[in-house]
Amino acid sequence: MDLKETIKSHAKDLGIDKIGFTTADNFAALKPSLLAQKAAGHTTGFEHQNLDERLYPDKIFDQPQSIIAIALAYPSKIHDRPPRTGPKRGRFARASWGLDYHTVLNRKMAALIQFIKNTAATDTTIRFKPMVDTGELIDVAVAQRAGLGFIGKNGLLITPEFGSYVYLGEIITNIKFAPDEPMACQCGTCTRCIDFCPPKALLGDGRMNGQRCLSYQTQTKGYMDPEFRPMIRNVLYGCDICQQVCPFNKGKDFHIHAEMEPDPNTVLPELIPMLSLSNKGFKTRFGKLAGAWRGKKPLQRNAIIALVNLHDRSAVPHLLEVIENDPRPMIRATAAWAVSELATTPTDELTTFLKNAQAKETTKEARTEFQKAIDRIVQR
Ligand code: SF4
């Protein structure tokens, strides 16, 4: 058995659900499309900023020969959900269930590299560069070319076995492997992800306007544009709609990796306690999730918006406390917006409270948000 076949036959033992191999050839064919995306303002800034490093493996690795692509399947359903009655809850998208997938994939790739080193022990010249998500290369492009699946119109890698519910990682190496066959797009005439995407972020050809993607919107740190606020529903991080509606994901729910199991109370947290979450509480409770990478502020802003979307009027006294005590203008002003949406019986007392709070605001944005909230209440 040659090295590639040996690796493939041991991948499952290493906790890798799919593995494929491709050349270290460049991805220059993607350049015009990436440039057009940037020129159109459709990028998010979360992408690796050096375009050549994204497209040319030899810019980031000396004499690369191959890229090994791996995929790990993650669960799509939570068993033992908390009861739907009771306090209102938010939701983390599936890619933020369990232990941060960057940690999980890096461990798997380290184990794979060790396995290859042990297997090819006589060759001391072999080298590897693993990466996941935040690395230079474009994960879906590598995975597609390595035959793990095809890129759907939602821009995600879709595998025949696990649908798009997979995490991707890749390893550049100086070992020459025979490449696997890339998989062609199998979306056909389906347009479900495009049709169901609330902000119409998908462009129809596998690309998206990242600025309109709800997952991106939940990860920004400033004010959320009012257009997107109702669209996020009760999601605190991520989105998942384009995955949920995809026929290739129907019935796909794999619980293969213990570290990816979601804790229901963590990934479906009660919303009102989120408003007064301390830094320590945030780290203890959410610090290990992928969705913690932007800190607690976006999650708390989204929790306020989710309370409005769920029409939770019991949140009003807690929101008034936020307006009075929270040190962050954006959070106070978003809470003022929420109060104006949730208050059923506008009173002079409430208007006076908001006017007094507005007078203490020092940023123009916060004062404007407060004014809109006051106007909304007065006009009701
Ligand atoms: Fe392709 Fe339809 Fe899935 Fe979108 S929903 S990725 S169009 S199969």
Image: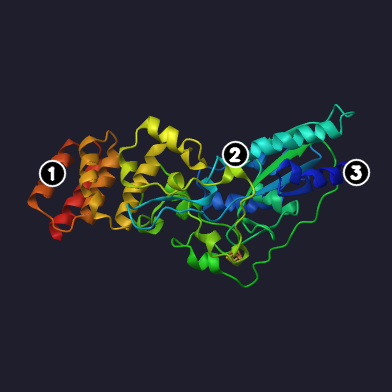
Nearest to viewer (mark 2 / mark 1):
2
Residue 239 location, x and y as percent? Answer: 48, 54
Task: Tell me which amino acid carries mark 2.
Answer: His
Residue 319 location, x and y as percent? Answer: 24, 45
Mark 2 to mark 1: distance in Å? 45 Å
The residue under the point 44% across, 62% down is 198
Task: Tell me which amino acid carries mark 3.
Answer: Asp
Whether residue 344 is visible? yes
Where ligand 1 lies, by quadrant?
A: bottom right
Sequence-wise, which precedes: disc 1 or disc 3?
3
Disc 3 marks which residue?
Answer: 2
Left or right of 326, for residue 248: right
Farthest residue to the bottom: give it: 189
Which picture quadrant has residue 185?
bottom right
Q: In the rendered view of the protein, which quadrant contains the C terminus?
A: bottom left
Which is nearer the eye, 70 or 144? 70
Label 1 with label 3: CB-CB less than 8 Å = no
- Where disc 2 sits, the SS reads helix
Disc 2 marks which residue?
Answer: 102
Callout 2 crowding tier (Cα within 10 Å): few <14, some 14–19, many ≥20: some
Left or right of 318, for residue 234: right
The residue under the point 44% across, 44% down is 266
Disc 1 marks which residue?
Answer: 353
Callout 3 crowding tier (Cα within 10 Å): few <14, some 14–19, many ≥20: few
Farthest residue to the left: give it: 348
Q: Is mark 2 within 8 Å of ligand 1?
A: no
